[in-house]
Image (tube, grey):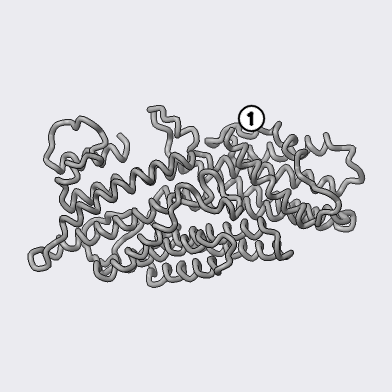
Amino acid sequence: MTCISHRRKHLWHSLGETSTPEREDIENWDNVIERCGVRQCHQLLNIANCKLKLQQELTSDEKGLEDATSNVLLLLENIKRQLQSLTPKPNGSSSSEINEHNEAWLRLLHLQAEAQLGHVSMFSHEGFTGDPKHWGSPATDVVNARITIGQGLDEIGGRDVHTRAAPRSVILHPTTDAALYLQYRSLFHMFKGRTEWLLDPGNKADGLKKALHWFEMARGGLENDSSLLSALIEIYVTEAFLARGRSILYRMESGREFHEAQEMYDSAWGALRRARESLLVSHRHLMWRKLFFRITTQYHSDRLLLRYAKLQEKALSRPKQNRQYFEENAREALLRLRRAYQSLVSALDLYLPLSAKHDPAHSNRFRWLYRMWWELTLCGYSTGRAVIAALQEDNRDDDQAHDYVIQQLKWLNKADGVDESALKNAFEKNFHLLREQYEKSPYGTEAEPRLVTALNLRRYLINEANELSRI
């Protein structure tokens, strides 16, 4: 029985029904919602949360997520109307009834903002290249999300929820005085931070600075009461820095792209460390640990891609004078590639086994990780070939260089557990494509600046990984 089916059954019985419903999707029946009290509205919110998280975790396609979020938002609107009709009377309701209603209202705004943002991370689904023209996503409605977040921040002051009941939210736990004010305030500030950088692709209006301000506001006051929420804030700080790094390396405007992107990735690493420390002391919730390892893999992938671009720029100059540089960078790239494969496998290990019931969407649920595997493997192969080409006297040993790099990558995939994971034999099935993609690399003309050529080569690997992950 799925989590959604279990919650539907719980809701059906709480309405006093003993028979089996004619249709499974009882949350879409108007007559069911109209019969719901505040406690049943909480159960409806649980169903909405499960439906949203399920589609986010499948990471299959933009259209699927867009349809799912539209259905969730429709359900939330129906719940909102019911909650409005159940508004407690000021003088005729107990404090527990008022608290239950207030918490339901804040939960609804939380889920509405999350559904409007769509993606659990902007790097999931079709990928995030840093191209300002494709900065947004069909499944993301940032404008309406900002409106919902504003409503949430306005409501939390007048709906100061106190509860001694069991937590209804996975990431929000009452403080020692049974209050939820700080948690909801941090949650909406975190969402606000995500919207700021999403609305400013070129950082023309200091979108990243504004986002970091709201993330800092989200951190405030949580202390040790909400380690899981603290971890989630740091994960989304990392996402913002990685997105900004990709944007910088896409534009090629300042001539200082490598240095600026390096600063973004150094800051992302600090946020990841803080996220890891918070996760170590939080309860073990699978979804957010999985997100942590996926973002960590994305971080390593972007650092490798930056190193590859730096190596290519140096190789286009006079490499024979830089032998030590290439050897040191090759070793460092190898170590980072190993860490990336290990974090990728850690994320794969946290996926639940497939259900017996066939669902076509399940075949794409590793899409984000599969794309990152392609980014890592293409980058590893291209880095190895670039270093060998820079160090050898001529280019007559292409076959030997190819065989050597392939053997190294094959060993890494086996040693770091990729071959034994859900991406079993991914390397054996696809290694023959590596040389073909590498030889298509757009090296440009001699008149083209080395920096432009190097960044175009990096961008080519990102685009090819996105395409190959669809196969």
| Picture coordinates of residue 153, whole percent (x, y) | 34, 67
Left or right: where does residue 80 sit relative to residue 455?
left
Judging by the rendered image, the residue that carries numbered circle 1 is 429
The residue under the point 80% across, 53% down is 327
The residue under the point 74% across, 44% down is 382
Q: Quadrant of the N terminus?
A: top left
| Picture coordinates of residue 183, whole percent (x, y) | 34, 65
Q: Quadrant of residue 98?
A: bottom left
Q: Quadrant of the C terminus?
A: top right
- Please, is residue 445 above or below residue 163 in the view? above
Q: Amino acid at mark 1?
A: Lys
**Number of disc labels:** 1
Q: Residue furthest right?
A: 393
- Please, is residue 214 above or below residue 381 in the view? below
Left or right: where does residue 118 sit relative to residue 423?
left
For the residue labelled by badge 1, is the local secondary structure a helix, a strand or a loop? Answer: helix
Toward the viewer: 197 or 403?
197
Please say whether residue 407 is visible from this viewpoint.
no
Toward the viewer: 169 or 129?
129
- Please, is residue 282 above or below residue 220 in the view? above
Q: Residue furthest left?
A: 92
Left or right: where does residue 246 sit relative to residue 30?
right
Toward the viewer: 14 or 423?
14
Left or right: where does residue 177 sit relative to residue 403?
left
Please say whether residue 220 is visible from this viewpoint.
yes
| Picture coordinates of residue 455, whole percent (x, y) | 72, 53
Q: Quadrant of residue 206?
A: bottom right
Query: Pointer 1: residues within 10 angstroms few (<14), some, or many (20+)?
Result: few
